[in-house]
Amino acid sequence: MVFSAAELCEAMDKKDNIRNVSIVGHLSHGKSTLADSLIAAAGIIGQEGAVDARMTDTRADEAERGISIKSTGISLLYEMQDESLKAYKGERDGNRFLMNLIDSPGHVDFSAEVTAALRITDGAMVIVDCIEGVCVQTETVLRQALGEMVRPVLCLNKMDQLFPGLQGEGVKRELDGEQVYQILNNVIQNASDIVSACGNGTPHLGDVQFYPDKGNVAFSAGIHDWAFTLPTFAKICAPILGMEESQMVTKLWGDNFYNHVTKKWTNVKTGSKACQRGFVTFCYNTIEKVIQACMDNQKDELWRMLHKFGVSINDDDKNLSGVALVKRVMQTWLPASSALFEMMIFHLPSPLKAQEYRVENLYEGPLDDIYAEAIRKCDPEGPLMMYVSKMIPASDVGGFFAFGRVFSGKVETGMKVRIMGPSYVSGMKRDLYVKRVERTVIWMGRDQDGVGYASCGNLVGMVGLDECIIKGATLTSQEEVDACPIRAMKFSVSPVMYVTVECKPLSDIPKFTQGMKRLEKSDLVVFCSQVGQRTYTVAGAGELHLEICLNDLRGCFLDGAQVEVSGPMVCLCETVLDKSCNVQSKSRNGHNSLTMVACPLDEKLVQAIDDGLLGPCTDHKVRSKILGESGWDVSLSDKILCFGPNNRGPNIVLDMCKGRSDLNLLKETLVECFQMASVEGALIAERMRGICFEIHDVVQHTSEKFSHTKNQLIPMIKEAINDCQLKANPRLLEPVYMVEIQAPESALEIIYGILNQKMSHVFQHFQREGTQLFILRSYLNVGESFGFAEDFRAATSGEVTPQCVLDHWDTLSSDPLMRNSLSWGMVLDIRKAKKLSPLQS
C-alpha cells in the first residue's frame, strides 16, 4: 500500500496499532535486505528493486562497504486482511498498523547504535544467518535487548542456501530435509540458550524463548524476498489434512513424524522412508518441489502446484526461468513482508503494553510519581517525558536532529522543553537547559516529513536542540521541574584506541575546534579530548569505528581545516592496587581543606557497575545486597555520593565523614570535579577504573560558604583526587579482545599462523554442527590488533573477517612510577603524545 504523511500522523494516535521494532543481528546476516522487503511492501520502493535498494543505508560509505554504520529509522503503514487477523487476540483499532522500524548495524564496532535503537523500541527482530548460526554479535544484541526489556522475535535468514541450485557459485551442500531441520533447530536452541542465560526476561516481560510452533520464529530468504512462519504452512496444510490450524501448527516442529502412506502421525521415526518429520514433509519438501520445478523449467507441474496453493503469476512473469523465476514465484507465494509483519504484530507489544513493564527500567525517579505513572500508561494527556537516544547530522552544515521516543505526553513544534543531559543529577543545575523545539519531523528512511506534534509511543526527530544536547538527553515540559531523568544508556562497547589530531595552520583553529565538537555529537561512543590549543585525541571502539570517525571529521565536519593524524594507540585505564594514606589538600588561601583516601574497588562491584546492576538509580535494597555480597558493610549503601565518570562509571566516592562536616556545602563542586578527574586520571589522563575515593573530612571557611566562585575549591579537590591515586600503588589496565572467527577448514592453517604472530591465545575451537564451518575464539591484546582484520582479509582473499569484542581489562604488572619499568616508559610516551607535562616519580 502507498500512504501519505497525513495518514501516518493519524496512525500515531492509535497506540494499540503501533509497533516500534529494532532490526538487529550479526554482521552480514541480511538485516538491511529484509528491511528493504518490508519497505517495498509499504509502497515506498518498488518490489523489483527491493533487494538492491538498501533504503536504510543512508551514507555513501555504507553503500561502498556494503555494511550498515548508523542505525536508521523509517515509519510506514501496513494493512492486514481480516482473514489474517482472525487469530489475533490483542487490542487493536482497525486493520492498519504503524510500523516504526530501526535498521541497525551488525559490526561490533557500532554496537552503540544498536543500544540506541533498542532504548526507543519495544520489540526486536533478531536476524540470524541459518548457516553461520548464532555469532558473537547475535549474543550481544540479544543480551542488550533483554537488558532494555525489549521483547525479541527470531528470523532465520538465507534459507535459500539450504536448497540445491540456490547455494551460489562454488557452494555445494548435499543436505536432506532432516539435516536441514537439525541445522535450523540448533540455531533456534542456541538463541534460546542465550535467552535462558539472561534469565529468560523478567516476570513482567514473560516467556521470551523462541518457539517456531507459536509463530515467533520466521524462516526467510531476504535476497529472494520470501519468508514464512509455521502458522503460514498450517493455514495451507490444515484444510488438506482436515485439521484445525491450531492443531496443525504444533505438528510442524519437534518430534512429530507423518507417514504419507498410512496418513498417520507418530512421535518417533519408524524407519520407513514414507515417515518423515512434519516440518520436512509439509514445509521443506513443499518448498523444494516448487524451487526444483522452477530450476528444471517444469512449468506445467509448477502451475499445478501454485494453483493448489491459490497462487497466480502474472503472464509477463511466466516467461522467466531459473533463479529469476524462483524469486518471482516465491515472493508471490510466500511474501517476506506478510510473514515478518504478521510476526511483529502478533508477537511484539504495542507501546501501551510495553511501557507498563519498561517504566521500572527507564525512569530514575520514584515509580509512584506522576511522571512514572504517565510513562506506565503511555498517557497522551500526561506530562511530556521523552528520551533522545542519538543526534543525527542534518544536510545543512552544522545542524543536527535530536532523534528519540516520546514516552508520555506529546512534543510540539514551538514548545519550550526542559533538557536533562546524562550528567544531570536531580536537585543540581549541571547539564540542565531550557530550549525551544523549532521543528518536529518523522523519519522516512532517507527523507523526513514535518509534523505539528508527536504523541507518546512514537519516534520523532527535532530541530533546534543541538546546542544543548551532545549525545543523549531526557526532555520534559519547561514547567515540570520535579521530573527525574530517564536512565542514560549503557553501551556494550567503549573506546579502546585513539589517535591524536593536530590542526596545522593556526588560522584554522576555530573551524578545527568546531569540527571536533560536531564529530563528538555525531557518534555515541567517540570521545574527543583537547590536549593542546591545536591538538585533540579522538578515541573509538575499534579500528573500523575510528576510521569512519576520521573520515567523517575530514569529509563533513572540518569545513576545509587542514589536520595531521597520528597512528593509532591503545586506550588504557588507570587503577590502584592498595589503599593510600590519608591525603589532605588545602585551598590556595588556606581557608578550606579536604581529607580523602583512595583504595581499590572490589572486582565484583566493578562488574556489577559495568553490567548496569549497580548505579545511582539502583533500588536501595538491591544496592545493599550487592555491596553485602562483595564484603562491604551494607550501611555504606547510603554513603555513596556518586559514580563516575558520567555518573555511572566503575568508580565511587564515599562519604566517610564522622561528626560535623562541611561536605554538603561543596557536594556539587566535589561531584563535578570527580566526574572530570575520573575521565582523566593522574598518570596518563585516561579513564579511571575500579577506584573508590573515601572522603574523611571537609572544612570550608565561613566566608567561602557564600562565595559565588569555585576558584578555591576546584584546584583543591583535583589535587586531592590525583594525590590519592598516585599514593595508592597505581597501575595501568590494558584492554583485551575476545576474537571470534568463522572459516572453512581450508583456511585454518592461515588463521592459526596469523593468531600466533599476534600472540593471540585460542581458547575454543569447534565445528558448527551440520556445516563445514569452524569456529575459533581467542584472546587478543588490543595493542596487537592494529591491522588484524586487514591481515585476515588479505591472507584469505576476503573470505574471513574476524569480529573483535572487548572482553576484559588486564592489569600491567610493572609499576608506572618506577623509573625504567615498562609502564614508566609507556607513561612517558603517552604523556608526550598528548602534550602533557612529564610525570614526576
Image: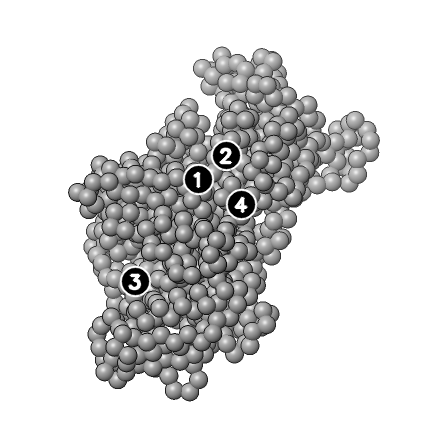
Q: Secondary structure at mark 3?
A: loop
Within 10 Å of disc 4 (Cα), the crowding (few <14, some 14-19, many 20+) is many
Amino acid type of disc 1? Glu
Rendered image: mark on residue 526: none
Comes first in the chain, label 4 or label 1: 1
Identify the residue at image location x=30%, y=62%: 431
Residue shown at the point (62%, 24%) measured from the top left: 163
Relative to residue 373, is residue 170 drawn left or right?
A: right
Q: Is residue 611 above or below residue 257?
A: below
Towards the viewer: 559 or 243: 559
Q: What is the x, y in percent for residue 471?
A: 34, 52
> Residue 472, position in %: x, y?
35, 54
**Amino acid at dot 3:** Asp
Q: Nearer the viewer, mark 4 or mark 1?
A: 4
For disc 2, the marked residue is: 789
Residue type pointed to by label 4: Asn
Sequence-earlier tag: 3 or 4: 3
* Res 242 seen here: no
- Asked which quadrant contains residue 499, the reply is top left
- Say the numbered circle drawn on residue 431: 3
Instruction: Nearest to the eye among marks 3 and 1: give it.
Output: 1
Label 3 or label 1, whichever comes before in sequence order:
3
The kind of secondary structure element at disc 4 is strand
